[in-house]
Image: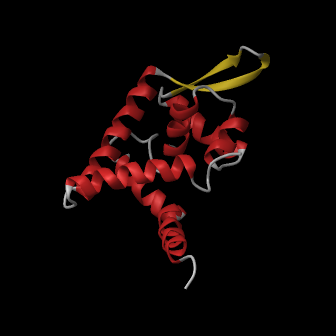
Amino acid sequence: MEHVVGHEVADALGLLLRRGTRANLYARLTEGLGPAVDEVTYPVLSGLARTGPRSAADLAGEIGLDRSGVSRRASRLEAAGLVRREPDPDDRRAVLLALTDAGASCVEELRERLAARIESSLASWPADEARMFARGLRRFVEDGPFTEA
């Protein structure tokens, strides 16, 4: 049988990347962080933390939503003081979305929660196996089929 490992990884990634899997994880990570922070707005916060200030259109491409979906979510986050709109220094007609200090703190809390969940999931693994998995996953993400040309 050819490509056994490739099929096994592809099947696991399929489960991991399902919208329902992500939404469920985001819902658990965002519990108690206020009404504006939920599984729907999580990708906007996370995306802005990764990319820095972006237009709604640029952020939409980064996080897999359309521009209007990003704008609606950003409005909720803006009302909660987690995101602000600022002029684009390269095009004064354009507006960028950016995290506020409160938004950056919220993202830091989300990252801590995610790291704790991952650590908890790996707690039963031998430490060297967990480290090897982390290194292998990093290598796969950096050098694997998902890297940009």
Outermost residue on the front side: it is 2
Q: Is residue 40 visible?
A: no
Q: Is residue 77 above or below residue 62?
A: above
Drawn side of residue 93 relative to residue 47, left or right:
right
Q: Residue at x 44, y 53 (%)?
A: 137
Q: Is residue 135 above or below residue 79?
A: below
Q: Is residue 29 above or below residue 55?
A: below
Q: Residue at x 58, y 31 (%)?
A: 51
Residue 11 position in % (x across, y down): 51, 73
Drawn side of residue 149 relative to residue 36, left or right:
right
Drawn side of residue 46 relative to residue 135, left or right:
right
Quadrant location of residue 130? bottom left
The way the protein has been coloured in the rendering is: secondary structure
Residue 10 position in % (x across, y down): 54, 69
Picture quarter with the N terminus = bottom right
Quadrant location of residue 94? top right
Q: Is residue 120 above or below residue 1?
A: above
Q: Residue at x 52, y 30 (%)?
A: 79
Residue 62 position in % (x across, y down): 64, 42
Residue 67 position in % (x across, y down): 71, 42
Picture quarter with the C terminus = top right
Number of numbered tags placed on the structure image: 0
Pick the front one: 115 or 102: 115
Pick the front one: 135 or 112: 135
Q: Residue at x 39, y 48 (%)?
A: 135
Q: Is residue 144 visible?
A: yes
Outermost residue on the bottom side: it is 1
Pick the front one: 21 or 143: 143
